[in-house]
Image (spheres, grey):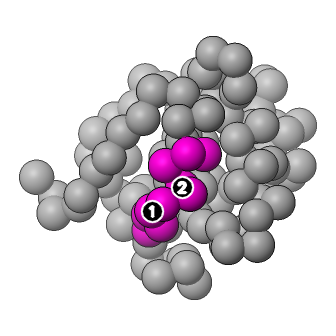
Amino acid sequence: MEGYEVETVNSGAAALAFLESKRPALLLLDVMMPIMNGYEVVRRIRNNALLESLPIVLITADEKAFFQKEFDVKVHGIIRKPVDPDALIGYVQTTLQQSHYL
């Protein structure tokens, strides 16, 4: 409804495969996923020269685990669950405006 084109995948591996063929303006990534968590997905993305500046925002309900890893994974921000839809749209708009990736 806000004019964004949204594509979804259901795992970290699927996100990495998606990024092999498409370059989104922003990646919203859940931390808690089966097999490969969001932190590992971010690490792999940041090791790819073509994607190293891709804006990534993590989504999580786990406040304590994130703070230590935040600096290690180099993300543009975090959204806490439960996600407020209006706050999410505002966060997306702000992140895209501040991004040098576009």
- Give the crowd class for mark 1: few <14, some 14-19, many >=20 residues within 10 Å: few
- Give the crowd class for mark 2: few <14, some 14-19, many >=20 residues within 10 Å: some
Q: Which mark is residue 22?
A: 1
Report x, y in % for residue 35. Answer: 69, 17
Q: Which mark is residue 53?
A: none
Q: Are marks 2 and 1 in contact (CB under 8 Å)?
A: yes
Task: Using the rendered image of the protein, determine whether residue 5 is visible from the camera's viewpoint.
Answer: yes
Q: Nearer the viewer, residue 18 or 60?
A: 18
Highlighted magenta segment, given as a residue range: 16-25
Q: Residue at image x 42%, y 35%? A: 9
Report x, y in % for residue 82. Answer: 43, 24
Q: Is residue 101 left or right of residue 31?
A: left
Q: Is residue 62 left or right of residue 29?
A: right
**Residue bearing the label numbered 2:** 19
Q: Residue at image x 36%, y 66%? A: 93
Q: Main secondary structure of the magenta part?
A: helix
The three-letter code of the residue at mark 1 reads Lys
Q: Secondary structure at mark 1?
A: loop
Indicate the quadrant where residue 2 lies: bottom left
Check the image and name the residue furthest to the left. 1
Indicate the quadrant where residue 31 lies: top right
Q: Secondary structure at mark 2?
A: helix
